[in-house]
Image (cartoon, rainbow, N blue to C red):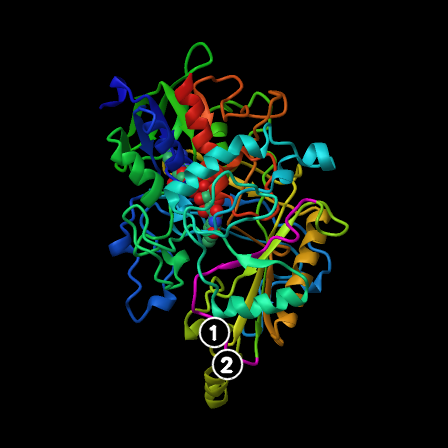
Amino acid sequence: MSGDEGWDTIVVGAGAGGGAAAYGLTRRGRSVLLLDAGPRFDPSTDYPLSGADWELREFPQKPGSTGQVTFAPGQKLGREPLLASGSRGWGPLANGATRLMDGYRHVRGIGGTTLHFTGEAHRIHPAAMKMKTRFGVAADWPFDYGALEPYYVEAEELIGVAGPATQGARWRSRGFPLPPHPLSYASQTLGKGAKALGLDWQANSRAALSLPWNGRPPCNYCGACNKGCPIGDKGSADVTFIAAALQTGRCTVRAESPVIRIEAGPNDGIAAVLVGRPDGSIERIAAKQVVLACGAVETPRLLLASEGLANESGEVGQNFMDTLFVNVGALHPEPQHSRRGLPSDAIAWDFNAPDAIPGVIGGCRFYNASGEAELGGLAAFALRAVPGWGRDHAKSVRDLWGHALHVGAIGEQLPNRESRVDLDPDARDRFGVPLARIASALAEADIARLRFMVEKSRELLAASGARRIYESYSSWDWFAATHVFGTCRMGDDPASSVVDAFGQSHRWRNLWIADASVFPSSGGGEAPSLTIEALALRTAARMASI
Ligand SMILES: Cc1cc2nc3c(=O)[nH]c(=O)nc-3n(C[C@H](O)[C@H](O)[C@H](O)COP(=O)(O)OP(=O)(O)OC[C@H]3O[C@@H](n4cnc5c(N)ncnc54)[C@H](O)[C@@H]3O)c2cc1C
């Protein structure tokens, strides 16, 4: 089908949201052109982990797979020794005076950032969707948990999420499709500490198969989820939603096809998208319906670069929320076989409700981060955890290898007017489109939440028997966002939101958004992809019904 003959819908961005939207539309009989700025990845050839250098490998870079962004100057820092990032071996990470604006580690490609995500699969806490009404902060979601629940079920079924029977406030109309993964040795040790502190340490729900599912094999516990899953059990968007969309025969996927502009037409409609080709030329593709799913940084960039399209409220790019995180590592006197098992296999939801942390609004959760700490190999362990040189160093490394335990915490960041995405006035990409510029500032409530997160992480390590803390990292002095939200908030009021409760632009009726940019609040540290996918399925169902 060529452009002007017309696909029913053009979906821009093939990550969590775009993949799920394409699946939701094609399974309801609509034809979809799925465009992504980045390349294709082939798990069997692009993620080889069998070589001697496996430990040093990161998620592979291919031409065009790394987006370009710039950063506004980092926030000025006060004195918070507990929150400062650094390790015994490497020393302090930041300069102590300003927040290090270092990273936005997202992937451009077919599958988007889910290609190198860990694969935690969480539903949002129902109370975290009503932050304005209940606590006077952020904004309410324009519907409640019950409206999203059927789409969570649909997403979990397609992915093959493995999880426990219940997860407290997150009620379920159907159990997880697969049983939870067994807890690793490190998680069992942390579980004893959690129990001593009165915490409910339980199996995490994971987009990693515990049994064969839809032709994909179960996880082999190689621990390298963030380096790219070579066997395809991790539920990234390429092997789940996009594969299923392709199976319908109604989805055309085009890699290396950045949309550089959305063209407005008459009668408040979108007429076309302009796509940059690898040779530098530009193609115009006429559009009936357009779904933007470029993520919470690139979606507002594209709208702002299209003469501020859909920005009647002035809210495009505002309310940017990033990942409030803590990661503390300590050595246990006994071996913990730290590199074994599934990363992030266990979690404590005790402080996840918006009012669960004493004295501060907004939740967080704690998890076993031992597998995610990039200490799977000896080199990183020797450099970060055991400083020194020569024979003594070699002996310490031999004695302590496998003794590391890591506790991670992820928490809510509340939106504020200093955190936003806008267009960089000076930097442009090769098609002349201004780059996105990220500004992020933590408010006092965020810093208070971070203090709680680091203190509780240390308590949990100590209660588990870990003694020597050798590193501690937090987003107080280090912006390295993995989860990003906001920037095209959904809501009922066109004056204060960009899209309505179904992701449809208040003004441009054939323009929809289906990614993390529509979140009015971030939740209490839940990993976002499952919610993004459920939202995108809900948007697709709505589009197909009108
Ligand atoms: C290290 C790491 C670990 C993570 N772990 C987890 C986890 O365990 N669980 C979880 O739920 N989440 C996790 N996340 C976050 C998760 O990956 C993202 O929240 C999710 O992928 C966001 O989905 P999205 O659809 O909004 O954007 P993305 O998945 O980033 O997809 C956006 C896509 O749009 C494309 N695009 C952008 N601009 C254009 C354009 N102009 N034209 C065409 N295409 C464009 C990009 O190339 C990209 O492929 C992790 C993230 C990182 C970095």
For the C terminus, give its image quadrant. Answer: top left
- Would you identify the image quadrant in which residue 477 lies? bottom right
- The residue shown at (47%, 44%) is 175
* Residue at mark 2 to residue at mark 1: CA–CA distance: 9 Å
Tell whether label 1 touches label 2 (CB within 8 Å). yes
SS at circle 1: helix
Ligand 1 in which quarter: top left
Q: Which residue is mark 2?
A: 400
Q: Left or right of 541: which side holds 75? A: right
Q: Amino acid at mark 1?
A: Phe
Q: Position of residue 306 (x, y in %)?
A: 45, 25
Q: Residue furthest top?
A: 267
Q: Amino acid at mark 2?
A: Leu
Q: Nearer the viewer, residue 56 or 463?
A: 463
**Which residues are the magenta region?**
333-354
Which of the numbered marks, if any, corresponds to residue 381? 1
Q: Left or right of 57: which side holds 140? A: right
Above or below, 226 against 112 in this view is below
Near mark 2 (Cα within 10 A), the count class, few <14, some 14-19 or many ≥20, is: some
Q: Residue furthest left?
A: 1
SS at circle 2: helix
Q: Left or right of 184: which side holds 363? A: right
Q: Is residue 460 visible?
A: no
Q: Position of residue 340 (x, y in %)?
A: 43, 69
Which dot, 2 or 1, sits closer to the camera?
A: 2
The chief SS type of the magenta part is: loop
Residue 339 magenta: yes
